[in-house]
Amino acid sequence: MAVKVVFLHGIGDGDPRGGWLEGLNRGLTQAGYEPIDRANTLAPRYSAILSTEGIGAKMPPVTYRVKDDSKARFEFARRQARIQRSLGLPSTASGLGAHLMPDGPLNTMQGFAVGHLSAYDLTQVRRYVRNEALRGAVLRHLLDQDFGDEIILIGHSLGSVIAIDLLDHLPENIRVRRFITIGSPAAAPSLHEGSERLLKRFPYARVDDWSNIFNPADLVTGGRGLAPTFPAAQDFAIDIGFLEHGAGNYLGHPAVANLVAQITYPSKSLVLAKSGIAVRLTDSQASLLLLLHYGHTLVRYIKDPAAAARYAGALRLRQDHVVAEIEEFATVGQQPLAAELHQLIDGGVPTVPHLWELHEAVGELAVLALTNVVDPYEIDVDRAPVQAIPAVAFALGFSTDVGEKVVRAIEDVQKALDRRGGVPWGRVLGAAAGLALLAAGPVGLIAAAPVGGAGAAAIVGGLAGFGPGGMVGGLAMLGGLAGAGGALAAGAVAGGGDEQSSALDLKTLVLRVTVEHARKMLDLPFDQNLWYQLADAETRVCGQINLFEAFSDPKSPRLAMLREIEDSLGRLMTFVIANGLAPRSIEAGDEVRLEAQEPDPAAIG
C-alpha cells in the first residue's frame, strides 16, 4: 500500500495502544476490506510536549505559496461532490441528542466526562491555539516524521486542530490524498478569540478533499460542523452514540471506514460493456446531451475569463453528477446505453444528435436560452446565454438565423413583461416584479424507464437534483400545455397553490408565448389556442384576488404576488394580440362584432 495513514491523536496520553487503528480495522473488515497493517500507518505522539511547561519552538515556515490555485479549487469541489454522492450522509446535524446537551456555551461548560476526558475542558486545545511557541514545537515534531509522498491524514479531537494547522506547513512533495477530521472542536469560537485563525488559506493544490465527521451528541464538537469556520470542510453527521467521542468508534463507522478504503484499496474504474446492438437515445436523453452541449458552447461566449473559468468548473461538477447517475442506471438496472452516453461517461461532450424537426428545435432553443445550466450556482455571464443560441441551432442542423430569431422572440416577450425595459441576461431573468423565469430549471434530463432491481430508479431521483426542474424536459413542458393540458396548467396558476407554484406556471405560459412567437417569425404553424389559455389563467387569478381581498391584509405577500401575476398575464395577452398570435376574432375585437351587425355595402349594391 503506497499511501500511508497518518493519525493525529487528541488530548490525553496519545493512544499508545492504537485504539484508533483497532476501530478503523473493525470498520474496514465489516465493509469487506483487509485490515491495515500498523507498518503502513504513522501515529506520532506529542502529549508530552502539550503537557510540559517551557517547551517551545519557532513556527515552521508556510510551504504552500501557490499564486493561483483556482483550477485546483474547482477540481477540489468536484472531488468533494463525489464524496457526498458516495457516502449519502446528511451534512447537517439531525438534532440527535440535542435535547440532552447541557445548556451554556462550549467554552464555559465543565465536568461532562467522556471516558477519562472532560469533554468541555478544552484547556489543552486553547493552549495549543494561543501559544505560538507551543504550536511551533508540536508542528516541528510532526514535520520530523517520515510521512512518505502520499498520505491519508486523520485528526481526532485536538489532533484535528493540529492537522488543520499542519496542512500549509507540509513539505511540498507530500500529497494529502484524503483529509479526515473526526470529533473536532475546531469550530468553537473560544478557540479563535484573541488568536491567529488557523489555516488562513486552504491548500487546494495539496489536499484532494476534506471530510469532517461529527457526532451531533458529541459534546466536544458542540453538535456543529466545521464548514462555517473552514469553508473547505465538508461536514457529515453520524450517530455513534450519546456523548460518544472516542476515535475508535468514529473510525469504526462504515462511512469513515469507506472513506479510508476508497484511497487505500481503490477499485478499478468500472468499464461499462458496450453492446453490439445500436441503442437509440430517448428524447429526454437527447435533451440532456443538448443541455450539456449548450453549456459548453456558452462558456466560449463569456467575456470575463474568471467568470468563464468558474462557469466551466460548475458545469463539470454538474456533468459529473449526471455521469454518476448514468453509470448507476447502466450497472444496477442492467440497461444498455447509447454510444453518445458512453462518450459522455468517457469525459467527452458528444455531438448533438439531429433528432428534432424545426418546430421542435425552436422550443428546445427557447428553453435553453432561459436555463441556468449550472444551477444552483449563479454566475453573471452577461449576454452569453443568447449569444450561444445561434451556434447551438447550427449544431442541431439548422441555420444560425433560426437561433437569432429565437433570441429576438425571447427579447420581445421579456421587454413586454419588464416595466423597466431591457433584458437582464447576466442575472436570473425576471418577469414583472422579479418573478423568476426558467433560469433555475434545466431543459431535459435523462428519463429512464422503470427497471427492476434495487436502486434502478436512482437515476430518476438522483438527477432531480440537477436543478429545480428535475426530470421535466423542454418539449415535455411545452407539450404538456397543449390543448387540455393548457387548461390544467392555467387552473394550477389559481388553483389554491402557493406563490411558488403560481410563479412556476406563469413561467411556463411565458415560455409558451415565446415559443409560439418564434415559430410565427419563422413562418411555422403556431398554436392560436394560446390566447384562451392565458385568458383562462387570468380569469382564475382574478377570482383568487377577489376572494383574498375580502379577508387578507391589503399588503399581503400572497395578494401582491397574485397581482403581479395578473399584471404579467395582461401584458402577455396584449403581446399576443399585437404580434398576431391570437385568433382573428380576438384580434379584431369590437370590429368583428360591428361587422356582424352592420350590412355589407357591397352586398347591398
Image (cartoon, rainbow, N blue to C red):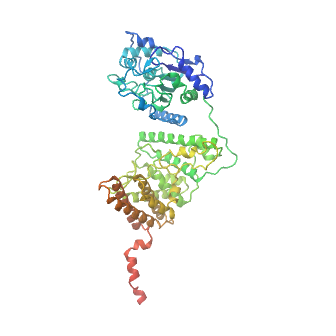
* Vertical position of residue 420 compared to residue 458: above or below: below
Q: Position of residue 42 (x, y in %)?
A: 53, 17
Residue 173 visible within the image:
no
Name of the residue lying farthest toward the front: 100
Residue 23 position by quadrant: top right
* Vertical position of residue 137 compared to residue 536: above or below: above
Residue 149 position by quadrant: top right
Q: Position of residue 517 (x, y in %)?
A: 45, 62
Name of the residue lying farthest toward the left: 554
Residue at the spot 53% in from the left edge and 42% down from the top edge: 319
Q: Position of residue 547 (x, y in %)?
A: 35, 61
Residue at the spot 60% in from the left edge and 19% down from the top edge: 37
Residue 466 visible within the image:
yes
* Vertical position of residue 423 compared to residue 96: above or below: below
Q: Nearer the viewer, residue 430 or 355?
A: 430
* Vertical position of residue 472 compared to residue 264: above or below: below
Judge from the rendering whether residue 3 lies leftward or rightward of residue 550; answer left or right. Answer: right
Q: Quadrant of the C terminus?
A: bottom left
Q: Nearer the viewer, residue 3 or 220?
A: 220
Q: Quadrant of the N terminus?
A: top right
Q: Position of residue 392 (x, y in %)?
A: 51, 52
